[in-house]
Amino acid sequence: MNKKHTTLLSFDQEHLWHPYTSMSKPLPSYLVEHAQGVTLTLAGGEYVVDGMSSWWSVVHGYNNPALNLAMKAQIDTFSHVMFGGLTHKPAINLAEKLIALTPKKLTKVFLADSGSVAVEVAIKMAIQYQHSRNKAHKNRLLTIKNGYHGDTFAAMSVGDPVNGMHQLFQGFITENYFAEAPQCGFYDDFDEQDLASVKHQLEQHHDRIAALILEPIVQGAGGMRFYHPQFLKGCRALCDQYDVLLIADEIATGFGRSGKLFACEHANIEPDILCLGKALTGGYLTLAATLCSDHVAQVISNGEAGVFMHGPTFMGNPLACSAANASLTLLIENDWHAQVMNIEQQLKAQLLPLVDLGNVEDVRVLGAIGVIEAVNPVIMDKIQKRFVELGVWIRPFGKLVYVMPPYVISKEELTKLTDAMRAVMQDDSLFQCPKAPTK
Ligand SMILES: *Cc1c(COP(=O)(O)O)cnc(C)c1O
């Protein structure tokens, strides 16, 4: 790294907030100079294979020619116009595509700026829906523990009450209802008891509850857990029984990541409201969407307000929509299903055996997601540095060392990721209070 890079990095440390970091004791950041395919080039000259898809988003790889072309064409046409009173082809095409790809019931599309905002929109829809049916008392949410739905306040209010640090914002965060998280894993036999807590909450509080919100099948940032499809099926039935809407937050799982185009398909259910984001634009720009059923839309529109009360400045941004359109086209052209199944098979072959290592508590793989849960939490700066030395970009949190690579990753590149994961799991010095290998 030359002097210029060092100056840039020290400015960054001094002045730029990064996600969940301290300004007094910031962890080091790595300067990216270039990104191509599944490889990031760092200012130190290292090439690292990306295992994170920049948080579930860059599914087709960096600097993708088709995505670049689509955005350049749109820039030369127009980059933005207000969505109030105006519309445009990129948004119309995107809505058509989303309606065709998602569960049949979902026919109305709200374009939002980010995942968290898509969740806010979904929550508002649920509350306005109940209000419009003269059920204004149904203005709370039910969710399951270990969830993550974003960092804005309503989204935080349904995040895990412990990990989500509700304590810190007490008095400012709406109090919602929490059911126990499902215990049966995706591959386990299902135990009906898993649904008891959701059932109990609905029995007790259904007259206060507008909607049940959850991440279908994969609980992401709340613990990278894969639960049983039967649980989701049961939740759908209970929502119907207790007159509560079901909001599926597929911001992480959408567009093939879990092995189905949408994780709801594992349970063969349709939500009333669906949140999409992250991979929507192939990771090019921030854009999210909240879809709802015709019924939900009609009830809201015939209610007291007569309209749905939301409309961000950059709603339906044409550049973001054009990236999303190109990304959805590529998803089909590249045969996302074959891509994801190949990744799943290789992750299973290369990661599952690591369960025998002393530092490993559990290993789980679903679709293009591979998770190693360690016995002890990682030492973040040390393990990050080690991963970069091993030529990969993998960013663990807590006890979780996991990958969700771009779908375009090659067999060799994926092996590089799993080799690096094995190497760090064998190194006690990268974990807090290292445990002697006993297994
Ligand atoms: C990332 C994520 C969000 C929040 O999306 P942002 O774009 O970061 O606001 C919401 N829900 C789930 C399930 C997510 O994974």
Image (cartoon, helix red, strand yellow):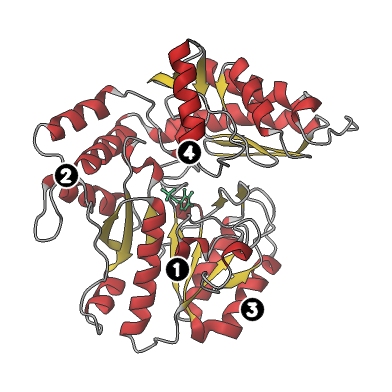
In this view, 388 is above or below 432:
above
The front one of 393 and 416 is 393
Q: Amino acid at mark 3?
A: His
- Name the side, left or right, on which 370 lies relative to 295: right
Q: Which residue is mark 1?
A: 246
Q: Which mark is residue 200?
A: 3
Coordinates of residue 269 in the picture (x, y in percent): 45, 61
User: Residue 339, image x and y in percent?
Assistant: 44, 30
Q: Quadrant of residue 163?
A: bottom right
- Which sits in the foreground, 175 or 306? 175
Rounded to the nearest angstrom, the CA distance separating label 2 from label 4 is 25 Å
Measured in 3D between alpha carbons, the distance from the residue under mark 4 to the one under mark 1, in whole angstroms, is 25 Å
Disc 2 crowd rating (10 Å Cα; few below 14, some 14-19, many 20+) is: some
Q: Distance between the Cα atoms at labels 1 and 3?
A: 17 Å
Mark toward the viewer: 2 or 1: 2
Q: CA distance from mark 3 to mark 2?
A: 45 Å
The numbered disc on residue 90 is 2
Q: Is residue 85 above or below residue 380?
A: below
Q: Kindly state the secondary structure of the residue where label 4 is placed.
A: helix
Residue indicated by mark 4: 55
Does the residue tagged 1 have its C-beta within 8 Å of any atom of ligand 1? no
Residue 276 placement, left or right of 197: left
Instruction: From the image, state whether disc 3 or disc 2 is nearer to you.
Output: 2
| Tags 3 and 2 touching, CB below 8 Å | no
* Rendered view: 414 above or below 187: above
The CB of the residue at mark 4 lies under 8 Å from ligand 1:
yes
Closer to the camera, 155 or 328?
155
